[in-house]
Amino acid sequence: MQLDRPAHRRATRRRRLVPGLAALALATSIGILPGSPAQAEPDIEDVEATVDRLWHEAEQASERYNDVELELEGLREEMTSLEADRERQDDQLDVVRERLADSVVSEYEGNDISAAGQAFLSDDPGAFLSQLSTMSAYSDFQDQLYTDYATEAEALDLRLSATEKRAQQVATLEEQLAEEKATIEERHGEAEALLERLEEEQREKLLAGDTSAVPTNVPASGRAAAAVQYAMAQVGDSYVWGAAGPDAFDCSGFTMMAWAQAGVGLPHSSSAQYSSGTRVSQSDLQPGDLVFYYSPISHVGMYIGNGMIVHAANPGAGVKVDSVNAMPYVGAVRPG
């Protein structure tokens, strides 16, 4: 049933007001609005929800940062290769230039060198090519030299253009890294500021969360056994943005290092890890499988059996054991 227009507008206003009122109530409860009376006992459930949201936004930015770093690493490697190609091409162009200059000097030996001949001896490829078109009656050998020179000059120009393009892409990605880093720090700072407003007992309760019992034995076979063993040994370690051990991890750094113990290389990115193995359904999960969360993917953990995962959760909980459905489930892959 459709609402009439006035009723529809009223319903729309109510939907818009509800989130704002909720945010206002939270801000008032923890005393962050100017002139509002600060209360000693903020609603811990509201604070917990806000802190979880801020940590998740920080993790999303952190995983985007990891993605950009991977792309930047590839671009820098490509630039190194392009610069080496450019230097080789430059050397080849010098060789052809010298051969062509020797040919012109030989032909005009004993005579004044024409403007076109002087162009041959120029270090400016553009001047050479523009003047060369006015010359005529060259031998087959000279024609071939011209063709070689034009080919090498064009190849050099292509390499210079490609190198410049990659350099611009690197600069753009470095700007993105700075932006994502600023977002991480901002969200993390907001979460810490909220936590500091809680009494110590409430803060410890919030950070402890609902920690599941850590299994004493996780059955795993093959290379997965080494990955699971390493992962379980890190339970209790800290969560730090961008970290990959030995005593602190972010989510993708944690799974990357765990599978590295089994000789399997994974990228330091949850979204990239989702493309680094064989997809498996949730009903077919085995210990060692990587499980991914949120859309777009921004978190990864390791399945350990019995409907549980081990993962680097957030700065408050660190590395811990959780239910496989503790977060919005997206899919799973089996590395190796």
Image: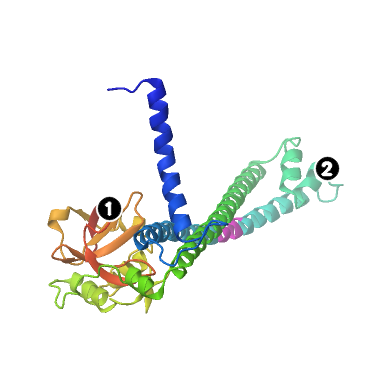
Residue 34: x %, y % from top left? 57, 57
Q: Mark 2 points at which residue?
A: 115
Q: Mark 1 points at which residue?
A: 328
Compared with 87, 205 (above or below) is below
- The type of residue carrying mark 2 is Ala
Extreme residue in the right direction: 112
Secondary structure mainly formed by the magenta segment: helix
Residue 292: x %, y % from top left? 28, 57
Using residue 144 as the reference point, say whether residue 199 is left or right of it. Answer: left
Using residue 22 as the reference point, say whether residue 114 is left or right of it. Answer: right
**Magenta run includes residue 84:** yes
Q: Quadrant of residue 134?
A: top right
**Magenta run includes residue 92:** no
- Residue 294 in view, yes or no: yes
- Residue 317 in view, yes or no: no
At x 15%, y 66%, the residue is: 305
| Image quadrant containing the N terminus | top left
Q: Which of marks 1 and 2 is nearer the N terminus?
A: 2
Q: Give the range drawn in magenta.
A: 82-89
Q: Is mark 1 on a helix, strand or loop?
A: loop
Compared with 140, 245 (above or below) is below
- The type of residue carrying mark 1 is Pro
The label shown at residue 62 is none
Q: Residues within 10 Å of mark 2 (few under 14, many from 20)?
A: few
Q: What element carries label 2?
A: helix
Seen from the viewer's position, the closer of residues 44 and 72 is 44
Q: How crowded is mark 1: few (under 14 residues within 10 Å), some or many (20 or more)?
A: few
